[in-house]
Amino acid sequence: MATARTGSFRRFSAAERDAMVAAGIVADGESEALAAGRRFTVDEYLALGAAGILAKEERVELLDGEIIQMAPIGNRHMNSVDWLGHLMRESLGRRAMVRIQGSIQLDDATMPEPDIAVIRWRSINDIAPVLPSDVHLVVEVADSSLEFDLGDKLARYAAAGIPEAWVANLRAGELVVNTEPEGTAYAHVRVIPLDGSVSPQAFPDVVLELADFIPAVD
């Protein structure tokens, strides 16, 4: 699947490419391929972080083997994520975990970082990656990234079998709820206005008012 990016590829300097070889992440002689935009596996991507080649503070994610630099988060976006994370945790308690802007592994070459991921409860010693089978719901809060989040990124979630995906459209003040993944799309899509409410399909007793986590449109 081609990547319609809202950010740019993360390019690597000659020194960083040499560090990859020295760390055993890539083979000697791959410098030219790296300079041309070689794709990475999830294992290689994680190794780049462990080796310090990708800095901890960098906003990147791995999509179809491409390391994508994400746009900075604005105040309205972050406030929406903060509130939704708080409401989810308060409502769900120990029935599920709420991961905020953390990674989930969709396949061997794709590890996005949705704004919110509601995942199965796990112990402190369960350090395995979060896989699609662990995920109840993902949420993307979208402003500048709206077209990408509703397009290629949503298609990746559907293809991985994520049962429910919400896109909070900050431009219009509405929530796009996607359920029933089929191929690279969701069979059931509904748009909820700002004065409406929503419940995750896995937790129908949880009722969230959109106005509590999506700011009013200017």
Image (spheres, rainbow, N blue to C red):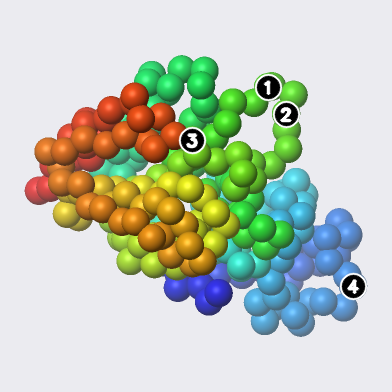
Q: Between marks 3 and 4, how big is the CA–CA gap?
A: 40 Å
Identify the element where label 2 is drawn: loop
Front-most of 25 and 132?
132
Q: Nearer the viewer, residue 182 or 84?
A: 182
x, y (%) of residue 157?
50, 56
Residue holding disc 3? 118
**Residue at (31% x, 56% y) in the render:** 189
Q: Is residue 69 left or right of residue 191?
A: right
Vertically, is 175 above or below 181?
A: above
In whole angstroms, how far apart are the C-alphas of marks 1 and 3?
A: 15 Å
At label 1, the amino acid type is Ser
Dot 3 falls on a residue whose secondary structure is: strand
Residues marked 1 and 2 touching at CB (< 8 Å): yes
Disc 1 to disc 2, how far (Cα)? 5 Å
Label 1: which residue?
Answer: 123
Q: Marks 3 and 4: which is nearer the front?
A: 3
Q: Kindly identify which numbered label has been placed on residue 209.
A: none
**Residue where numbered disc 4 is placed:** 28
